[in-house]
Image: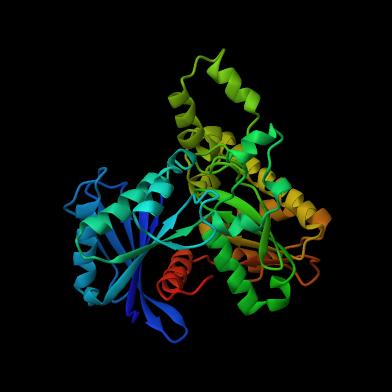
Amino acid sequence: MSVETLLTFNAGSSTVKVGLFERTATGPRRLARAIIDFRHDPLTFRITEGPKKIDIALNAKSGDDLTEIVAETFDELAKDFDISRIAAVGHRVVHGGDAFAGPVTLDDKTIAAIDALTPLAPLHQPQALRLIRAVANTGRGLVQTASFDTAFHRTNADFVRRFAIPRALFDQGVKRYGFHGLSYKYITGELLRTHSSIAQGKVVVAHLGSGASLCAIDGGESRDTTMGFSTLDGIPMATRCGAIDPGVLLHMLGAGGETLAELEDMLYNRSGLLGVSGISADSRELLESRALEAIEAIELFTFRIAGEMARLAGTLQGLDAIVFTAGIGENQPRVRAGVCERLGWLGVELDAPANAANAPIISSPKSRVSVFVIPTDEEQVIADETLSVIAGVKT
């Protein structure tokens, strides 16, 4: 198949990142980057990279059917690019369960299998499915593929994936899956390209954004991660709680009088940095605030990240490097410093000026553990995997 251009959709809970790529001899190269923001009324289509950088108000309305939004997206891209050359559309799908170990072509069977996993990722899975169906509804007849966040963690041992609950439940799918796999795959590739010896060693990557997790990587493969059965587990996030004593949940459903829907809303939307601070889910606002609640929220955030890094170093039985990535990890020196100060006993020592400048390497020459800041690019991984699928190449 002759492939000229690829389009990618990276669906979040409130935004969709869009990437347009052309095929080159060395793989997909980005032509444009955009974002559809559902938090605004009217919806906005923001082109952030390409021949122009503008905000466009969309006529389409948000809803269960995104066909009009996707159609407008194609129309806006057509003003600067020949979209008749688009040969395939790749989607990020958060949860692949045990059904998907790598990227796939989307058809009725695979879409139904993805839909069946919606209860495990209620914030993200429905949006990806709406986009998949919307692209099909535009009538362009485009091949569509899916790339899964969970696939990168299929190299975790069974005992790592287990909860200490009856074995039958593991066989029924109640296990730790892990997420942010596309980001971790990209970071692993960048490390291999720029610091190959470190990429072959023991690395903990911290993907710190609105959603946040850590991954222990050994020789380029995932060995352990902080997110588990759902995207709620692990470290605190913008509005999600992270790990919590299940006795708290039993209490809230029992003596607390909460309904299941109320509890779910609290855990996904009213916890994390927002819940602890009572001020904002945005770490930038909390770092600027002098309120004790804001200070405590950031302190809890960095405390839990450092604690999980130490645990993952135990999984790896050593630690050669730490990588910070995603919005917070790439751009907030105070968060990185707060984490690394708690890991001095592991030999982690930052270069303060380098950290303040968001430099690629922020560890001091004396540090026993190298510390990097590497921007992630999930859309590039989606494009790479889309090309591999339609070219019939396994990844």
Name the side, left or right, on which 164 lies relative to 377.
right
In the depicted structure, whether residue 90 falls above or below residue 301: below
Give coordinates of residue 360: x percent, y percent: 61, 71
Left/right of residue 366 with respect to residue 70 in the rendered view: right
Q: Which residue is at a point 59% across and 73% down the rendered structure image?
A: 190
Which image quarter is the N terminus in? bottom left
The image quadrant of residue 362 is bottom right
- In the image, is 250 to the left or to the right of 110? right
Q: Position of residue 255 (x, y in %)?
A: 57, 12
Can residue 188 be seen from the camera position used here?
Answer: yes
Q: In the rendered image, is residue 330 in sight?
A: no
Q: Nearer the viewer, residue 222 or 45?
A: 222
State the image quarter where residue 319 is shown: bottom right
In this view, 267 is above or below 65: above
264 lies above or below 340: above
Residue in view at x 70 percent, y 48 percent: 158
